Amino acid sequence: MSQNFDIIIVGGGAAGFFTAINIVEKNPKAKVAILERGKEVLSKVRVSGGGRCNVTHACFEPNELVKFYPRGEKELRGPFHQFGSGDTIEWFEKHGVELKIEDDGRMFPTSNSSQTIIDCFLKATEKLGIKILTGQSVQAIFKKDDIWKIDTQNEQYVCEKLVMATGSNPKIWELLQQYGHAIVSPVPSLFTFNIKDKRIKELPGVAAKVTVNVKDTKLESTGPLLITHWGMSGPAILKLSAWGARILHDKSYHFTIFVNWLNDIETKDAEQKLKELKQEHAKKAVSKKSPFDFPNRLWESLVLASEIDTSTTLGTTKWADLTKIQLQNLALQLTKATFQVNGKSTFKEEFVTAGGIDLKEINFKTMQSKMHENLYFAGEIVNIDAITGGFNFQNAWTSGFIVANNIL
């Protein structure tokens, strides 16, 4: 016996819930169900932002907001004019969730807990009579006479309109390929760099604001970099991994990066600055204190890498004793430190993928498939992804809202 609904949403994540809630708020008589393959819904929401849920970003100008999306920048301009970050804040406030802005622009619930967002969604779905069906892994999709049939491992569901909000699910992409949709092959985005290098080996936890370039590419990123046990992470690295998702995949995650620890100061200017320091601090030990805006431990490591003695037994090198070569070496270590990247690490819970339904096959005014009437997409199932900072969630809210506005 099949179960009948007006609308079925496949995927019990952020995009699926937001779509369902907005549909029924606009159309209270609509019979809507969410199918989720796992035992739990909203599991990615739970772990996002370190368990605090980075709901959106305080960037309120659509033309600026789109710049945070390596894939989808052009397509999202129109949708963000319909439903942007400001609308997200208002929506959650109306549903009893207050958001706060942090210094870097990221926005979280004031409770600092992702459970607040989960509770908000569960309360809304219950109030609106939306059926949540867990443990329903979709095995097949059929379309006959404007009716969609969905087979899970133990049930059959029937609906007039179907919304796919399954995120990066290869099995669903495969099913949609059978319906003629092109899939841009998925590659990881948002990953950290594995680097074994004696300059950073003893420095896990040290952070600095830097500019990073990938050798032989145009990839460049500025922002905080965090040294970790396995290499480098932090916004500067994650941003680079998002913009370079395809390029770095093609390099099999083996490539060279240049790190400018002084952010925007060029090598020749750094050399000049070091010459001035040599005059000013002639009698002081070079490695003693960082003259730049980053931790002493990092400074000492870069001094050592420039072949300047830092050991106390031999008498630490004074500024006055620095040779021209040592000064040049140090200027290079500060502004163009070369590191070999050998592999990547991804956050399994917050895994973001570049790839999905080809953007040319979607009408971004409605989020409807251009190939099949009454088939809609929301969230990360399409070939859209963003850097960290609440932007991937904003895409989920925006696409879900547009589906809800146009589906009935």
Image: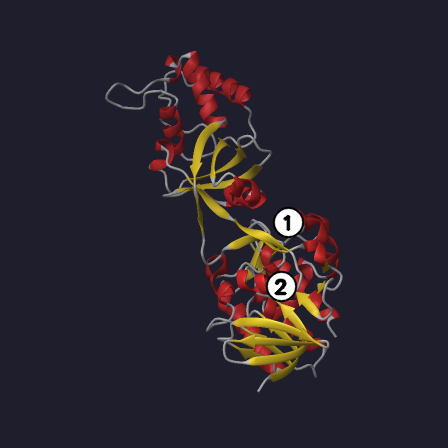
> SS of the residue at dot 1?
loop
Q: Which amino acid type is marked by label 2?
A: Gln
Residue 134: x and y in percent read 50, 76
Residue 293 vs 78, above or below: the answer is: above
Point out the image quarter for the C terminus.
bottom right
Mark number displayed over residue 174: none
Residue 35: x and y in percent read 56, 74
Residue 295: x and y in percent read 41, 35
Image point (69%, 81%), residue name:
30
317 sits left or right of 87 in the view: left
Residue 169: x and y in percent read 54, 62
* Disc 1 and disc 2 in contact, CB within 8 angstroms: no
* Foreground pick, 397 / 375: 375
Closer to the camera: disc 1 or disc 2?
Answer: 2
Residue 381 vs 231, above or below: the answer is: below
Question: Does residue 96 appear in the picture of this structure?
Answer: no
* Foreground pick, 388 / 361: 361
Q: Quadrant of residue 308?
A: top left
Image point (68%, 67%), residue name:
376
Residue that protrudes farthest toward the left in the picture: 313
> SS of the residue at dot 2?
loop
Which residue is identified by label 1? 71
Q: Quadrant of residue 23?
A: bottom right
Image point (66%, 72%), residue name:
162
Question: Does residue 162 appear in the picture of this structure?
Answer: yes
Residue 59 vs 308, above or below: the answer is: below
285 sits left or right of 262 in the view: left
Q: Which amino acid type is marked by label 1?
A: Arg
Which residue is identified by label 2? 178
Image point (60%, 84%), residue name:
3
